[in-house]
């Protein structure tokens, strides 16, 4: 989905675990390599975590690609909003992870928007498939299955 000025990607998943279990995985960059396609993750300064407003986190997806993000908003156990400050060529990136308790688990919505620039459109082509894959890995890991490779 995209508008003339903004690009959008999103993924939705349902996990048969409580929101606290999902929150533990998405609110701590140190946990990302356990369930996602990242090789490493952490905080600047090192040792910080889990996510707090103003904190800077990073995740590495290859030896040379490192995304650096700043936490903008946190509603503990429910909502995390961040922006990319370095690493991928996007402008005005804003992502939100929203957890909603269900009778039998958690509904997870993860979405991001950013400006429709030439490089932003190139990133969109990759993230439109990355987000659903990321969500599948998160749900599988949270439910006790190994994250898909």
Image (tube, rainbow, N blue to C red):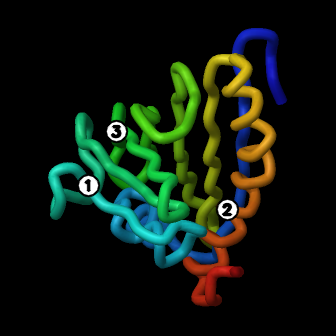
Quadrant in the picture for residue 24: bottom left
Whole-number angstrom distance, CA of label 1 to CA of label 2: 22 Å
Viewer-side residue, 74 vs 29: 29
**N-terminal label among 1 and 3:** 1
Q: Residues within 10 Å of mark 1 (few under 14, many from 20)?
A: many
Residue 43 image label: 1
Is residue 114 left or right of 58 when viewed as pictured? right
The mark found on residue 135 in the picture is: 2
Residue 96 coordinates in the image, percent (x, y): 53, 39
Q: Are marks 1 and 2 in contact (CB under 8 Å)?
A: no
Q: Earlier in the sequence, mark 1 or mark 2?
A: 1
In the image, what residue occupies the spot 62% across and 35% down?
112
71 lies above or below 114? below
Q: Is residue 19 visible?
A: no
The quarter of the displayed image where residue 122 is located: top right
> Mark 1 against mark 2, which lies toward the viewer?
1
Circle 3 is placed at which residue position?
71
Residue 72 percent coordinates (x, y)? 35, 32
Badge 2 density bin: few <14, some 14–19, many ≥20, Cα 10 Å: many
User: What is the crowding at mark 3: few (fewer than 14 residues within 10 Å), some, or many (at least 20)?
Assistant: many
Q: Residue at x 81, y 23 (%)?
A: 2
As drawn, is 46 to the left or to the right of 64? left
**86 and 129: which is toward the camera:** 86
Note whether 146 is above or below 66 in the view shown.
Answer: below
Can you give x and y, in whole percent of width and height, for residue 81 in the image?
44, 37
Q: Is residue 95 visible?
A: yes
Residue that protrudes farthest toward the top in the picture: 4
For numbered disc 2, what is the local secondary structure?
Answer: helix
């Amino acid at each position: 989905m995209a508008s003339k000025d903004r690009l959008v990607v999103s993924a939705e998943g349902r996990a048969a675990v409580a929101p606290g279990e999902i929150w533990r995985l998405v609110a701590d960059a140190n946990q990302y390599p356990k369930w996602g396609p990242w090789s490493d993750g952490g905080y600047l300064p090192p040792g910080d975590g889990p996510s707090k407003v103003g904190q800077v986190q990073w995740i590495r997806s290859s030896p040379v690609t490192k995304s650096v993000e700043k936490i903008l908003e946190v509603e503990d156990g429910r909502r995390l909003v961040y922006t990319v400050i370095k690493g991928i060529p996007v402008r005005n990136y804003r992502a939100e992870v929203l957890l909603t308790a269900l009778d039998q688990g958690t509904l997870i919505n993860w979405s991001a928007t950013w400006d429709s620039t030439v490089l932003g459109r190139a990133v969109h082509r990759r993230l439109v498939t990355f987000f659903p894959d990321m969500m599948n890995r998160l749900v599988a890991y949270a439910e006790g299955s190994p994250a898909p490779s």
